[in-house]
Every structure is written in C-alpha cells, then in structure tokens.
C-alpha cells in the first residue's frame, strides 16, 4: 500500500479490479469529485467510464462518516467509495490515484479496504508571491498539488516590503507604485537592476478561489501588518510615523525594515479597513491572516501620534500597541464573520484570545505551547522543520517528517494543525518552487494527516517511489535522492554552500 499520507486503517484483500469498459455511478452530491476522477482516468489512463445503473464503480454518500472522512472498498467485482461530502470523496480519489496500477496491458486497482480521516483539521501550504511574483496559472497548479497531498488551506502571502500583489480599486497607488520594484538583490549583495513586479487582479483571484473550492482548499489571504509594509508606505507615505523624514521605496533587498505603518494615525486604520473590505469581498475563507511578524518599534517610540495612542488607550508600551492594532482589525473582521491569524511574533497578553497564532519563530516554542495550553488556538509552521525555502541540507526530508506538532502540548485540541510555508526570496521560478517543496510537502502532509502513532520514516520512504512516478507524470520537478539522513557536518557544509551559491544543489537535478 503505497499511499501518502498514510491512511488511518487498511486491509489488503485478494485480487484486483481491472478497468475495461467499466460502469460508474455517483451520488449527485459527489458530482464535482466524480468529474475530477473521470477526467483523471481519461487523461492519464485513456479510460472512459460509462454511466450506468448497476456499475462496478460507485461513489456513495454516507452520513455516518465525518466531514473529511472516506471509506474505500475495492474487490474483484466492485469499487465503492463512500463519504459524507464531496470533500471526503475527493480525498478518496487522491488515494485511488496513488493505488492505480498498470500491468499486462491493463489498468487496475488492487483489492483493498481503507478507512481514512485526517488527524489535524488544518493542513496548509503557504506561498509568498511577493519576493517573486507567481501568476494565476502557477498558483492554480500548486493548488491542485496541495489538494493531492490532502491539504485544505492555501495561505497566499500577498503583501510585503518588496511588493503589493492584490489589486485594489480603492487605492490604485498600491498597484501603480507598490506592485513594482526597480530590482532584486542577489546573493553577492549586488542588485540585478531588473524591474520586478506584478499583482493578481480581482478577476484572477476569483478564478483562483473558484479553482481552490473545486479542490476543497480555502485560500487564506495575508495582508502583512504593521511591519513588512514598505510597498504600502511607498504608495502612501503619509502612513509613516512622525519624525521619519525619508522616502520609503518598494524594497529591493530582503530582511526586516524598520519602517512600519504608524499605529497612531487614524488614516492608517481608515485605509486598512477599506482595504480589508476589498479583501473579504474576494476571499470567502473564514480566516484572514494579518501578518504581525518582525515589526521593529523604533519609529513608534519616536512618534508623537503612536505615543499619544499608547497614553489614550492606556497601553503598557509599543508591544501592547501592536496587540491593540491587531485587536482593532480582529474586531472589525469579526463583524464580517472572519477570524484573524497572526504570526507568533504577535503573541501578547493583550492579544484577543480569539486570534489564532501561527507558530514559526525559532526559540519561541515553549511560549507557543504555553499559549496553546492556556486556550489559544495555534497553527504550527515551525521554522526548523517546515520552512520549505531553506535548502534540503538544512532541513532534510527526515527532519520535516519528524516534526511533532503536539510535543509538550496538554490541550491537543488547541493545535489546529500544520502549515508548510514557502518564502521566495531565493525562489524565482516554478521549477525551483517544485525543487524546494517536493517531496518535503509530502512529509509535512503526513505530519498533518496521519495519526501520530502510525508515523514511521522508513515506511514513509518505502512509499515514496510511487509518489515520485506520479510527480513525473504531473511535470513536478521534485528534489531527487533526499531520503537519507545526512550527518550534522554535511548539513552545515551544505547549508553554507547554499548561502554562498543558491543554485549549487538545485542545478544538480
Ligand atoms: C516569518 O517568517 N517572518 C513569518
Ligand atoms: Zn506613529
């Protein structure tokens, strides 16, 4: 049984179901997934399923199952896929795609019985389209791949210092000024002098959201606030703090900028509320990500308006001001039925308990776990295990696989799940995305989906070959030969090489 992520329960049976002039029927509620299944078989195996009344293949509705659960029963004579919803059925189809075999001139499914459901309800991937812009087509392909790994959230990092990638009709300067930078820094510290830009139009985003819906992913938009906002500040310099007498440009280099939005200026709140209304009109997701990471407070310390806000709102200091700022938009979005997520830099005693934190920052795990044990909902995106932008030397497949989201956690219900982010500072092409993401996303998916007590790295590796053959069919440039556990010395040396020459590892493939 070569399925990734590993199902909850399976039992091998005798025989196989050969696909030849095969009949198919499905509950109307599962029509979306039925069409994905049928299209896949037609395209990949040249098999056309006939609709008929007493067919061999049946997709059945079963209200006894949980929302994301599916059951699969394959014998010599029939294939029954049961689910409570189209979503559960789709996960069953992703399993079927991995079970499909070819031999003696025929396609077949081996006889098997599977009961399967995810361990965590939040299973995410994040793509940064700011540091390098990726268009609608590329995002839609990644949505399909994320769904194939049984993920259900696609976090889209839309704004940062280096660009603003959401079309705003209310604030066109965010696109005219904020969506372009004059160049991009290289690893040797020089700038390439090649203008870089782009943004997703509302039309693009509607298509992306619809595509994600078909594959049962929610797109979570991130507007990173109040730091990582040089692109907004380049377009609307009046949102800078008092006393900052310089022109902020859309940034060409990476890292942390000390220029952040003024949290004492009512114009900041007014613009962001209007912008968020544009965002929620496009994205139906229950979650909106408001960033909150890496916001240095020097400007706030020297700003009359920010200091006045601290006094008027009876806040302890600048960190409390950030919590106040986040809470303000949390309340605003709550009125529209949305829940806010922020990176765990934003964790603060004043932070509204309804706001979810996304844990990433090295050295903060204890603090995050304490928050979860005290009732805060958490998504785990641990830097050392799940950041897919770092080289395979630094974060080998085995390391990602070994991540335990529940370590030290006393209230596991507060760990919503896991997300693997891809930041794209050093990722400028779709082929490089694939190299960074796969197969580590398969390991992250198994962390998120498979019951922790069933996880076993050697067994996972034994199931990878089948996945690799499917990656090849799908045109995915996955990283080859990354299954071994390299020694710490090799890892350090390889990571150092990567910092000096980003492509040394990538070009080998
Ligand atoms: C982050 O990596 N700055 C969330
Ligand atoms: Zn200020």
Image (cartoon, rainbow, N blue to C red):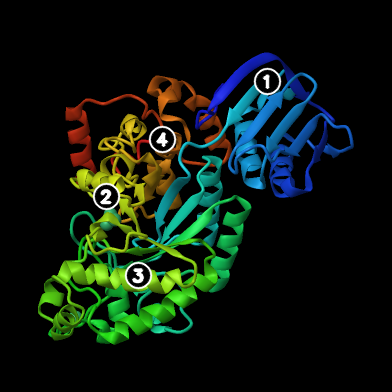
Q: Nearer the viewer, mark 3 or mark 1?
A: 1
Mark closer to the chain start, 4 or 2: 2
Please tell me the numbered disc located at residue 447: 4
Q: How far is the residue under mark 4 from the one under mark 1? A: 26 Å
Residue 290 percent coordinates (x, y): 35, 65
**153 left or right of 64?**
left
Residue 21, can we see it?
A: yes
Q: Are marks 2 and 3 in contact (CB under 8 Å)?
A: no
Say how many tags the image has: 4
At horizontal 45% and vertical 47% (from top left) the residue drawn is 122
At horizontal 37% and vertical 43% (from top left) the residue drawn is 436
Q: In this rendering, is residue 249 above or below 350?
A: below
Mark closer to the chain start, 4 or 1: 1
Mark 3 — residue?
163
At horizontal 43% and vertical 36% (from top left) the residue drawn is 439
Mark 1 — residue?
110
**325 left or right of 379?**
left
Mark 2 — residue?
371
Residue 239 percent coordinates (x, y): 26, 83
Mark closer to the chain start, 2 or 3: 3
Q: How far is the residue under mark 3 from the one under mark 1? A: 50 Å
Mark closer to the chain start, 1 or 2: 1
Q: Nearer the viewer, mark 4 or mark 2?
A: 2
Please tell me the numbered disc located at residue 56: none
At horizontal 22% and vertical 78% (from top left) the residue drawn is 248
Find ligand 2 in the image and state its quadrant. bottom left
Within 10 Å of disc 3 (Cα), the crowding (few <14, some 14-19, many 20+) is: many
């Amino acid at each position: 049984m070569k399925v990734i992520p590993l199902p909850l329960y399976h039992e091998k049976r005798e025989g196989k179901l050969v696909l030849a002039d095969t009949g198919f029927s499905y509950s109307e509620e599962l029509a979306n997934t039925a069409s994905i299944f049928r299209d896949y078989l037609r395209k990949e195996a040249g098999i056309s399923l006939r609709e008929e009344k007493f067919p061999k293949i049946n997709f059945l509705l079963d209200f006894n199952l949980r929302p994301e659960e599916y059951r699969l029963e394959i014998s010599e004579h029939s294939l029954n896929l049961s689910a409570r919803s189209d979503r559960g059925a789709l996960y069953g189809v992703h399993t079927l795609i991995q079970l499909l075999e070819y031999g003696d001139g025929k396609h077949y499914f081996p006889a098997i019985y599977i009961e399967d459901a995810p361990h965590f309800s939040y299973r995410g991937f994040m793509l940064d389209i700011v540091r390098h812009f990726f268009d609608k087509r590329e995002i839609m392909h990644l949505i399909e791949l994320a769904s194939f790994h049984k993920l259900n959230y696609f976090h889209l990092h839309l704004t940062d210092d280096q660009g603003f990638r959401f079309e705003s009709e209310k604030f066109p300067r965010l696109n005219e000024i904020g969506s372009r930078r004059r160049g991009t820094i290289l690893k040797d510290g020089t700038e390439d002098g090649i203008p870089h830009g782009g943004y997703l139009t509302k039309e693009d985003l509607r298509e992306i959201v619809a595509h994600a819906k078909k594959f049962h992913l929610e797109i979570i938009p991130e507007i990173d606030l109040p730091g990582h906002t040089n692109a907004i500040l380049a377009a609307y310099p009046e949102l800078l703090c008092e006393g900052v007498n310089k022109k902020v440009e859309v940034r060409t280099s990476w890292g942390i900028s000390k220029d952040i939005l003024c949290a004492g200026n009512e114009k900041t709140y007014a613009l962001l509320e209007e912008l968020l209304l544009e965002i929620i009109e496009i994205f139906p997701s229950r979650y909106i990500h408001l960033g909150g990471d890496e916001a240095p407070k020097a400007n706030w310390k020297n700003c009359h308006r920010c200091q006045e806000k601290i006094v008027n709102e009876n806040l302890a200091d600048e960190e409390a001001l950030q919590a106040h700022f986040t809470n303000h938009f949390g309340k605003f979005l709550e009125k529209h039925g949305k829940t806010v997520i922020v990176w765990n830099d934003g964790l603060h005693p004043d932070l509204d308990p309804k706001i979810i934190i996304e844990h990433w920052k090295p050295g903060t795990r204890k603090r995050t776990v304490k928050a979860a044990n005290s009732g805060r909902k958490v998504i785990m995106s641990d830097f050392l295990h799940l950041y897919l932008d770092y080289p395979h030397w630094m974060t080998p497949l085995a390391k990602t696989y070994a991540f335990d989201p529940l370590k030290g956690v006393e209230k596991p219900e507060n760990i919503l799940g896991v997300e693997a982010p891809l930041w794209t500072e050093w990722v400028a092409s779709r082929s490089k995305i694939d190299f960074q993401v796969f197969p580590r996303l398969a390991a992250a998916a198994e962390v998120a989906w498979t019951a922790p007590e069933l996880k076993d790295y050697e067994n996972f590796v034994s199931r990878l070959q089948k996945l690799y053959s499917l990656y090849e069919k799908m045109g995915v440039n996955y990283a080859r030969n990354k299954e071994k556990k390299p020694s710490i010395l090799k890892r350090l040396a390889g990571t150092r090489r990567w910092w000096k020459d980003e492509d040394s590892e990538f070009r080998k493939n």
